[in-house]
Amino acid sequence: MNLYTINTGFFKLDGGAMFGVVPKVIWNKINPADENNLCNWAMRSLLIEEGNRLILIDNGIGDKQDAKFMGHYYLNGDDSLDKSLAMHGFHPDDITDVILTHLHFDHCGGSIKREGENLVPAFKNATFWSNERHWKWATEPNARERASFLKENILPIAESGQLKMVPVAETGTVPFDDVAGVSIRYAFGHTDAMMVPEIEVGGKTVVYMADLLPSPGHMPLPYVMAYDMFPLTSMEEKKAFLDEAAEKDYLLFFEHDPVNEICSLQKTEKGVRPKEVGKLSHFI
């Protein structure tokens, strides 16, 4: 098995929204804001090569939204999904599977592209994986979360016939299809039934954190995003997961940290914290 970091670009979000009740004088030391109170964040995917499967986890914001929409998020940097795939010798048509941790636009927008007047899968040979519970949540959205679930990102996946569902488990993990070493755990605080992939590689466990833990700076329990639908659930899930991860020496892969791709963990008097941080290639 091989793992590859796939960088799809950076975008900006309000720092207060990203750190919830934590005061700016504290979080601004973690990810300094610009003059508009915006912090820069990565949209970092992970590619798994296992046998004849090439599995992409999440795919960024895509490029089909109009200028007004993109202007709200200040996309920046030279990375793109296609360029990052090409750096590793791959093309979107090579992707066999796309695991969508959840259907917020910054995680699944790259699934669908425009061809003339049509919206079509960006990965024409791939199976897209969600789960029934989250799919229903996203396609029948609540008023608070509706702006994050864009129908043009979601409905064409089902219409393509390329959509399959992963079974949901309240606890533990479920195997991912028939791919050895890949499983899915669930988290319910950020949004309902978000999938958190776990990958066994080289005797190590790499966990793709999605929005359960956007960055190493979010490890303290009260550091919960205002975007989370159920913040107390997020805190409980984060504590339970970090205790398990520290005990079992998991490596955490971060989707949104602007600098650090992955970290190991240590237990401290203040709780579980990063031990070493860096690039995926330094750990695997």
Image (cartoon, rainbow, N blue to C red):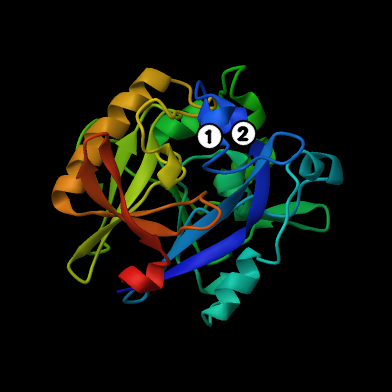
Q: Quadrant of the N terminus?
A: bottom left
- The amino acid type found where label 2 is placed reads Gly
Q: Which residue is mark 2?
A: 15
Mark 2 secondary-structure assignment: helix
Give the residue pinned by disc 1. Answer: 27
Answer with left or right where residue 171 lies relative to residue 99.
Answer: left
Residue 74 on image: x %, y %: 76, 46
Q: Secondary structure at mark 1?
A: helix
Q: Nearer the viewer, residue 37 or 191?
A: 37
Q: CA distance from mark 2 to mark 1?
A: 8 Å
Say whether residue 55 is visible: no
Quarter-of-image position of residue 283: bottom left
Q: Tags 2 and 1 in contact by the CB under 8 Å rule?
A: yes
Residue density around tag 2, few if under 14, some if 14–19, many if 20 or more, within 10 Å:
many
Q: Position of residue 255 (x, y in %)?
A: 48, 51
Residue in the image at 47% along x and 58% along y: 260
Q: Seen in the image, is 104 located left or right of residue 250? A: right
Left or right: residue 119 versus residue 92 is right
Q: Nearer the viewer, residue 235 or 143?
A: 235
* Residue depicted at x 51% and y 74%: 94
Name which residue type carries label 1: Trp
Asked whether residue 12 appears in the rendered view, the answer is yes
Q: Nearer the viewer, residue 69 or 125?
A: 69
